[in-house]
Image (cartoon, rainbow, N blue to C red):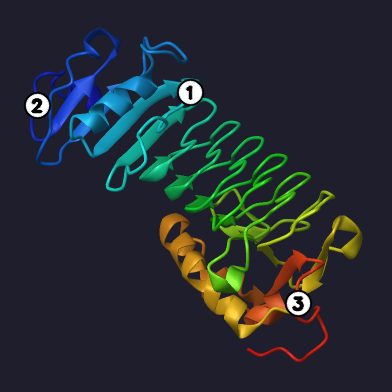
Amino acid sequence: MVLRAVPKAPQVSGGFTLVDHSNRTDIPSCADGGTLVADCRGFPMEGEEGTSFVIRDAFAKGWRHVMVIDSHGQRFFGCGLGQDSQGMRIEVYGTPGDYLASGLAGAIVEVHGNAQDQLGQIFASGKLIVHGDVGQTFMYGAKGGEAYVMGNAAGRPLINAVGKPRVVINGTCLDYLAESFMAGDPLNGGGFVVLNGMTFDPSGNPVDLPTPYPGSNLFSLASGGAIYVRDPERKVTIDQLNGGRFGRMTEDDWRTILPYLQENERLFGVPLQGFLLRTGGKVARPTQVYRKIEPSTARGAPEGSLDDEI
């Protein structure tokens, strides 16, 4: 790998330095940008000699870009950075372990592949980008921030989330998506999930999944926030909900989620006009494509009670 040719710490060349298990205590200070490459070969899965402590130490010494290579199950990447890690960017290659980006408060973490369980727990702020699938209990108890998942999420994503997390999942999820969601009013600074119900064919072209959400207990027992599901054929049914309802998708709803779908297109190349808003071979109005799922106690009109605004 080319990155292993980077001079090893404490040497720095062209703004790059390489850290592995043998020189993990030799990280130099960095005051002018630069990239620290952390080679996971030889690192234990966790503990004070783990890669997560290298990332933490690099941040404390002024590094603001860390590239983690050849990860193979090491846990806790991005944890322990403190209450304000804004300006830090962590890129992960390989197969990272559990709890990545948990408790994150400001940094950007980008996984160039699949991620594991307990990703982004109690996520406070920052941005999480996953170029693949995520495992169980994704963003459990999250309080804020943005997350973009190119693929699918396993069971119980976003359960017990509060505050204002904004999440785009391009694929689908198993059961209990956003169970006990408590994320306020999405039109007034609260949180939401956008579920696009799509995948990619062998040629890399976006295609619809057979159904946007195959499981049950969608938005069960939620008291705040919303799920915006891309479902032009109305395949998701009321019996898949448990304590939620289909609300009316309005122009305000569309304006709220649009910037996140635009960022999703920038990150993953999922065309908004060229795919997400197309149904029956032509571009449709957003309210014909996306549906809003909200708590049963929501004050707005239910789905179908008024004409679409858009």
Q: Which residue is drawn at 77% across and 46% down?
A: 176
- Mark number displayed over residue 75: 1
Residue bearing the label numbered 2 = 12
Which element carries disc 3, helix, strand or loop? loop
Which mark lies nearer to you, 2 or 3?
A: 3
Q: Quadrant of residue 301?
A: bottom right
Circles 1 and 3 in contact, beta carbons < 8 Å:
no
Circles 2 and 1 in contact, beta carbons < 8 Å:
no
Separation of marks 2 and 3 at Cα, in angstroms: 59 Å
Circles 2 and 3 in contact, beta carbons < 8 Å:
no
- Whether residue 292 is visible here, answered yes or no, is yes
Q: What residue type is labelled 3?
A: Arg
Q: Which residue lies furthest to the right in this view?
A: 239
Which mark lies nearer to you, 1 or 3?
A: 3
Q: How many marks?
A: 3
Q: Which amino acid does label 2 sit on?
A: Val
- Mark number displayed over residue 299: 3
Q: Which residue is drawn at 43% across and 39% down?
A: 112
Pinpoint residue 298: horizontal percent, then vertical percent.
76, 71
Mark 1, Cα crowd under 10 Å, few <14 / some 14-19 / many 20+, is: many
Mark 2, Cα crowd under 10 Å, few <14 / some 14-19 / many 20+, is: some
Q: What residue type is labelled 1?
A: Arg
The image shows residue 22, relative to residue 144, as above or below, that is above
Q: Residue at x 74, y 66 (%)?
A: 294
